[in-house]
Image (cartoon, rainbow, N blue to C red):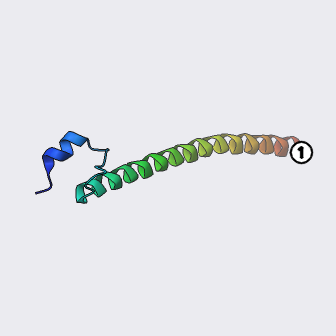
Amino acid sequence: MFEIVNVLKTGIFEPNKENFAFIDSLKIMLRGMLTIFFVTAILIAFVLILNRYSKKKKEKEERIQEKEMENESY
């Protein structure tokens, strides 16, 4: 039906360049989807790192402001 034997022989990420068929286009789409997931995971990781960094910096600034307010009240 989908020439499963040919798919297993050529590999999952290597499309057949001679007789480009439906399965070969699926391989290219799979490669593209995996790339999209990989890039998305990297972006999410960067956002989480930046969020943690800015949260620590914000808390530090708030503590400094609270100390200044306490010093001014005396």
Q: Which residue is mark 1?
A: 72
Measuring from the top left, give residue 2's x and y in whole percent: 15, 55
Q: Position of 33 compared to 7: left or right?
A: right
Q: Position of 7 compared to 43: left or right?
A: left
Q: Residue at x 51, y 48 (%)?
A: 44
Front residue of this view, candidates 40 and 31: 31
Front residue of this view, candidates 16 and 30: 16
Q: Is residue 43 above or below residue 67?
A: below
Q: Residue furthest front?
A: 18
Measuring from the top left, give residue 26's x and y in whole percent: 28, 56
The number of numbered discs placed on residues in the rendered structure image is: 1
Front residue of this view, candidates 54 and 24: 24
Measuring from the top left, give residue 51's x and y in whole percent: 60, 46
Q: Please identify the quadrant where the C terminus is shown.
A: top right
Residue type, mark 1 in image: Glu
Front residue of this view, candidates 57 and 6: 6
Q: Is residue 33 above or below residue 68?
A: below
Q: Residue at x 10, y 57 (%)?
A: 1
Q: Position of 11 compared to 73: left or right?
A: left
